[in-house]
Image (cartoon, rainbow, N blue to C red):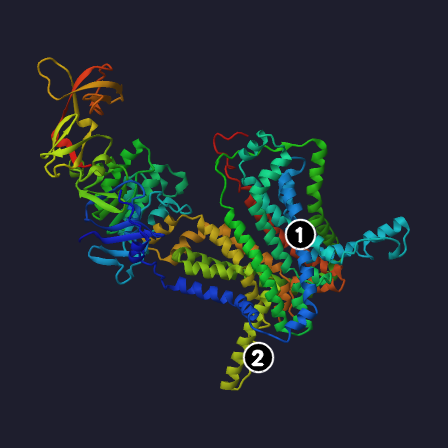
Amino acid sequence: MTGLRMEDIVHAYDGHEIVGGLSLEAKPGELTCLLGPSGCGKTTLLRLAAGIEALQRGRITINGNVVANAEDGHDEAPEHRSTGLMFQDYALFPHLTIGENIRFGLNGNAPDRLKWVARAMERTGMSRFVDAYPHTLSGGQQQRAALLRVLAPAPRLLLLDEPFSNLDVTRRNQVRDTTLELLKESGAATLMVTHDPEEAMFVADQILVMKDGRIVQAATPAETYFHPANAFVATLFGPVNRLLGVVRNKLVETPLGLFDAPDLTDGTSAQILVRLEDMRVAEESPGQNTGTPVRVLSARLLGRSSHLRLSAGNENANGVIVQSRVPGVFLPATGADLRVNIDRTKAFVFPA
Amino acid sequence: MDTVRTHPDALAATRPKRRLRLDAWTTGSFAIALVIAVPLVTVIFLAFTPNGDIWPHLVATVLPHYVSTTLILMTGVGGGTLIIGVGTAWLVTMNRFFGRRVFEWALLLPLAVPSYVIAYVYTDLLEYAGPIQGMLRDIFGWTNPRQYWFPEIRSLGGAVAMMTLVLYPYVYLLSRAAFLEQSVCVLEVSRTLGKGPWRSFFQIALPLARPAIVIGLSLVLMETLNDFGTVDFFAVATLTAGIYDVWLNMNSISGAAQLATIMLVVVLVLIGMERLARRSRRFHHTTTRYRTLPRARLRPVPAALSCLACAIPVGLGFGVPAFILSRHAFVNFHQSATPNFFGFAANSLLLSSASALLAVMIGLFLAYAQRLGRTGALRSVIRFASIGYAVPGAVLAVGVLIPLAGLDNAVDGFMHATFGVSTGLLFSGTIAAIMFGYLVRFLALSFGTVEASLGKITQNMDGAARTLGHSAFSTLRRVHLPLMKGSLLTAAILVFVDCMKELPMTMLLRPFNFDTLATYVHQLASDELLEESALGALAIVVSGILPVIVLSRTIARSRPGQNGTPGETK
């Protein structure tokens, strides 16, 4: 049992390359998330794995069996791959009832799967919609119907394309738990596509960050968040402060102090990225001031947190404007003097 | 940024070619498309085969006359349908007057009347012995035709009038759709910039609608070129009439083929015109604001004139013929409803239903194969095969008969040599030949309808069904077919009715002593027996109303933003 492996995949539409030499793996029993901006080739990968898009270059194996190999032209039809693909728009058949939709993938009599379907519909509260048609259901109910339809034939590989993107925020949280539960039980390898980093953090065992048809980082959620491989990954999770400087003696000097740059060569320019929530801000108190002095440009309450715009250093010379997000209510007056401390383990240094 | 990897040279080296999958769908489609293309290829092939002795003869004798008559006919019908079609479309989309809602669909009704039927009716009405001239003579006391002038209906001018009356709905249909598509904002801008309604029409609305109008016009001209019944009845020597004459009276099929190639040139020009217009149709509007059209309420006199302007084409193109045919059919019911009549009606029904069924099945097969394969080669072959809709029936008949005769000869020769039996004509001069002809000519109709309907089903449906373990065929059966029921029926109706009406191909390809309603009606009418032919003609007209209903239902739903988007002002 090795789950899904895609090796050296290249794919182009009308001469425009969408996927450029990419390899990935999704292990059985794990949820692997493809995370990246829209149009980066995520959905294409799912379609290739499912077999509804002809493979142009590379090799795809599912549980050790080669299902497509561009070298010898082998390309198994989608109906023979035992994969379940859940579409972003759910693609429920409008002329079939929910029950018929969910049972669509069960051929002949598969009593144990029928039993499973009945139980799963009961559990997810879908039993009362057995005879309803898709258009009469809410978005969340349609989502569950589509998920059950995919799971019903017990596929060895599950492919989910933005399964929660059509739901509003509150509904999304409810549905996510049910979905995760069902996915874990199935034991299949799951590859899910999303453009929402928080969602990926929430559901994934492994996150594959994609950009322009390539994978730029493959790691656990925590690793991805705390040790981003490059500036692109670091900025995925929200706005950051970006400080620029030149490396001298493995150090970068910025208006907010010195930062270590052990991996960069002297003389090159570097950027230091700090998330807004990692800027620790304190009021000046005589005697025990650490950190860089800054001046408040504006302070606004966002609800759960407060957002500050601060200017650091001499405004005319090498001054910068930085932002900070502070939990709770913290609204110093405009022009007030503060101090900023940055936890050096949460400052990411990359070549600029 | 590292997106600049698409350097052409690099791509040429690395980009994998889309493989042509040789499954049953693709190979089947290629085979079908090639067979459908045979008649067309035959005619084109004949065009390039020197056939010395007939050509100079044709040029010296009949050809110039055929060509000039055809051109005059096309110019006349083109001009007439443009004025009536665009004019009425503008009136019903932009103005409010008594009867507008009825005229919106009633203006399509003449489409149900084949041009040869309307020609018989008006000949009956307007000839010397007809009721109109009779009435005039009674009123004014004239006793012979030298005492007064009356237009001769059986003339080129008459043919132009007849065809204009039944073909203008093509232009009406497409220009109406185009006017509806136009954002009102564009017109309102024009009005606020100081242009009056007339100048707005000529400077804004008409140029915007031009591509659609050109498509409608090219369809009209294709039908004009195709017409055989009217020109034969009026003894107007067009190219189509010429093919029939040269083939059956001069007994020269190669001469007929030569004429066919000339028509093919005209057809290619028309197709080019249509394709060009279709391409330039997408799409100019930069605004997505559509509102219910603020139709101008007309003052009484213009309103009455508008009403009249719409009533005349409907009345002359549908009302009069329908009334006269019904009356004749009713009065002469016992003479008309003979066993012969029912036999021919059965022939028509069976032949048309079988052809419609076949055309829809093949259209579905091709459209679905195209969806599965999405290869350029397949697409081009299908496109070529569906040119048949533009090619006049008489030309296709030539293209159908020559290869079938060749096939017959080959089979006969083989059987004769091998088994000593002569098989004679197996294919040519059979019902199969007619059906093949219908298929070549009307496949584009069913294919186009099915293709459009398939296009509305998202590819995700296919993907979902396939990943759930269903084969391509099972997906078609369980997902697409149920979703497309309505469109398949529409496609079948369109083909069915066109087959019911079809005259030139049926005349040329039918077996000996085999008649359909169309050929029967034409035969009786040619023998000046309109009273007896009325029942058959009426049957054809009644069946022709079916697609008019389908069309009017479609256009009622066609306007963007029509389905009550919130925030719309009435």
Disc 2 is attached to a residue of which chain? B
Residue depth check, mark 2 versus mark 1: number of the one nearer the observer = 1
Residue B233 position in % (x across, y down): 72, 62
Disc 1 is attached to a residue of which chain? B
> Circle 2: is it few (<14), some (14-19), or many (20+) Cα within 10 Å?
some
- Give the residue at the far top of this rendering: A286
Answer left or right for B273 relative to B242: left
On the question of residue B294 being in view, the answer is yes
The Cα–Cα distance between marks 2 and 1, rounded to whole angstroms, is: 42 Å
On the question of residue B512 being in view, the answer is no
Q: Quadrant of residue A109?
A: bottom left
* Amino acid carrying mark 1 in the image: Val
Q: Nearer the viewer, residue B46 or A331?
A: B46
Residue on which disc 2 sits: B424
Counting residues from the start of the chain, the first of labels 2 and 1 encountered is 1
* Amino acid carrying mark 2 in the image: Gly
Residue B510 position in % (x across, y down): 62, 69
- Look at the picture and state if B166 lies above or below B179: below
Q: Secondary structure at mark 1?
A: helix
For residue B166, which numbered disc appears in the image? 1
- Look at the picture and state if B147 lies above or below A72: above
Q: Nearer the viewer, residue B227 or A245?
A: A245
